[in-house]
Image (spheres, rainbow, N blue to C red):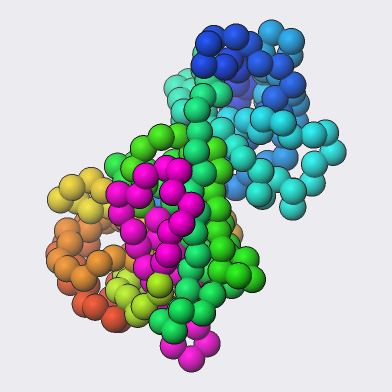
Amino acid sequence: MSPPESRIRVRGRVVDTGGVPVSDVAVGVVRVWPGGADTFALPTMFTSETGEFLVGGVPREYARIAFFPGLPPGTTAEDLSGWPVVLSRPVEPGTSNEVDIGDVVLGLSAPLGGVVCDAAGGPVQGARVVVGLAEASGLSRQAVLTDADGRFRFENLRPGKYFVHASFEFPDQGWQYRRLDGVEAGDIGLLLSLAPGSAVLLRFEAAERPGVPLLLRSGRLVRADSGIVPSFGAGRTPKPRDSWRVYFPPGRYQLRFESPGYLPVDLGQVVVDDGRDTELDITLTSR
């Protein structure tokens, strides 16, 4: 038997809430880095008259199929960044090189939006806003940047309660944050007023090369006492970084760090104080 391929093929069908196949829906791939920012690829095909699709080149790990209803041919990556998207459940290939994920329902959806401002009430342009289901991991999170008026908007969210987290680095004041919990999809009048907050600053090195910064692309910080994956704040991009900043409310937390290819690291009890970063140096050992 040949070994599993690093990239696989995924097939399925797109239907509406009545089970009727939906044709001409753009289909692409999204890489969903745990606890971090998602990386979208431009759609490579459209669903057939029977709503079916077969897309290749899907990463075996941390992947979902993305559907863009109404997306016209010739769309650029810049246009794609603001387009409503529906994500499939995570692809779970096992050892198979082709996976059937069944029917994907384009159901009811709602927007969520508002304004990010500073302590004086002025709009903040370029703040990073993350939204996600309260009980979910990074696989269900989305992120946008605020416009010149401090406004942000997410589209096509499924019904439910979400957290909304904003962060921005001011040149003279450093990082400031605001998080709202229990926000219902459909609320477009949110106001997030930034203030000095608390964060955990993570720095990495490999056990094989002590003292040399280790660039990581993916990983997650887990509350070992509850299994909750906190919201990543500023300092995380799809590119490898040698340090991450993760927003936390002040308190005491049992933390564990996980990253593909490395053994998990138990960080023990970490104290997070209000208004400053808690710095952690993490040594990772390859599996």
Can residue 33 be seen in this snapshot?
Answer: no
Residue 67 pos. (x, y %): 63, 30
Q: Above or below — where is 3 with respect to 43?
A: above
Q: Identify the residue shown where x is 70% and y is 45%.
A: 80
Q: Residue at x 58, y 15 (%)?
A: 15
Q: Which residue is located at x 55 percent, y 24 percent?
A: 106
Main SS, magenta residues: strand
Residue 277 position in % (x across, y down):
32, 78
- Whether residue 191 is in magenta: the answer is yes
- What segment is highlighted magenta in the picture? 164-192
Residue 280 vertical placement versus 136 (above, below): below
Which residue is outermost to the right?
Answer: 74
**Place of residue 172 in the rendered image (x, y in percent of width and height, measured from the top left):** 48, 91
Residue that appears at 63% across and 22% down: 9
In the orientation shown, which residue stands out farthest toward the bottom?
Answer: 172
Query: Is 169 within the magenta?
Result: yes
Q: Quick one: quadrant of the N terminus?
A: top right
Q: Is residue 101 above or below residue 182?
A: above
